[in-house]
Amino acid sequence: MIVGADGNLYGTTLGAETVHTSVFRLTPAGDFTILHPLVYSVFSVSAPTKTADGRIWGVLTHIADTTQPAMFAMDASGANYQEIPLFYSYNGPSVGFMTQPSDGNFWGVLGDAVVRFTLKGALLEQIPYIGTGSPAMLLQASDGKLVGLGTGEGPGEVFTVDPGVSAPAPIFVHSTQSSGKVGSQAMIQGSHFVGATAVTFNRVSASFQALNTGNILATVPEGATTGPIAVTNAGGTTEGESKFAVEQQ
């Protein structure tokens, strides 16, 4: 599962002839919704991912009634579902663990290679993996480099790829709570938070601690008023879409 820009969890299930494979949403309160069912024999073969516009993506074994590998894209609501053909053959390995770094394309792993391809499914680059195993999970670090895991029969590996792209700005800035008093702490979720240089509540600077790439613990500052939370790093500043309500003392 992944955390969406709205703070909900998104994932896929594995079905069979009588139970659909599906893309689902799970809220922090435990509300479960199937956003899109897939016909039998079509399965999701990658972890879901999200693009900067908040859409949910994943890789499918193939398009129904064909042997064409594909990826799906949909709004977080489940609307505007589409399937996009991919560049490799049905009988080979599938793209897994794809991510969208700051160049706007997808990067992922395919067999023993790291690949870069467009959101329309066209291959742009293929980089052979020279580790002792096979590449697995791939993420963009806060300095712009890609970091992944290599798996095999022996010890695992951590590897990096320098794609030559800019450091990513924070994305999916979202507070786990909608309000708080001055001096209280708020947990901010998103991505690319390592190396953050500033957090503001409606443009008022706040003290904070970046716990990891996806979580910041900030203190609601004196003088803050109701408005968006923003996070700044080397790649830029991003404001959250929702407003944080500052409660009166």
Image: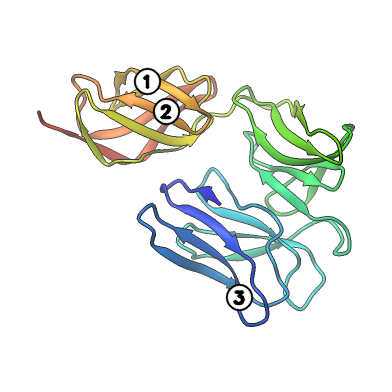
Could you tell me if the residues under marks 2 and 1 are in contact, i.e. CB atoms within 8 Å? yes
Left or right: residue 152 versus residue 15 is: right
- As measured in the structure, the alpha-carbon distance from the residue carrying label 2 to the one carrying label 1 is 7 Å
Left or right: residue 96 versus residue 168 is: right
Check disc 1: other Cα within 10 Å, few if <14, some if 14-19, many if 20+: many
Whichever of callouts 2 and 3 sits on the residue coming sooner in the sequence is 3
* Outermost front residue: 154
Q: Quadrant of residue 77?
A: bottom left
Q: Is residue 2 above or below residue 167?
A: below
Check disc 2: other Cα within 10 Å, few if <14, some if 14-19, many if 20+: many
Q: Inspect the image, locate mark 3, and give the three-letter code of the amino acid beneath it.
A: His
Could you tell me if the residues under marks 2 and 3 are in contact, i.e. CB atoms within 8 Å? no
In the picture of the structure, the residue carrying the numbered disc 2 is: 216
Q: Inspect the image, locate mark 2, and give the three-letter code of the amino acid beneath it.
A: Ile
Could you tell me if the residues under marks 3 and 1 are in contact, i.e. CB atoms within 8 Å? no
Whichever of callouts 3 and 1 sits on the residue coming sooner in the sequence is 3
Q: Closer to the camera, 190 or 131?
A: 131
Check disc 3: other Cα within 10 Å, few if <14, some if 14-19, many if 20+: some
Element carrying mark 3: loop
In the picture of the structure, the residue carrying the numbered disc 3 is: 20
Whichever of callouts 2 and 1 sits on the residue coming sooner in the sequence is 1
Which residue occupies 70% across, 31% down?
146
- As measured in the structure, the alpha-carbon distance from the residue carrying label 3 to the one carrying label 1 is 44 Å
Element carrying mark 1: strand
Q: Inspect the image, locate mark 1, and give the three-letter code of the amino acid beneath it.
A: Phe
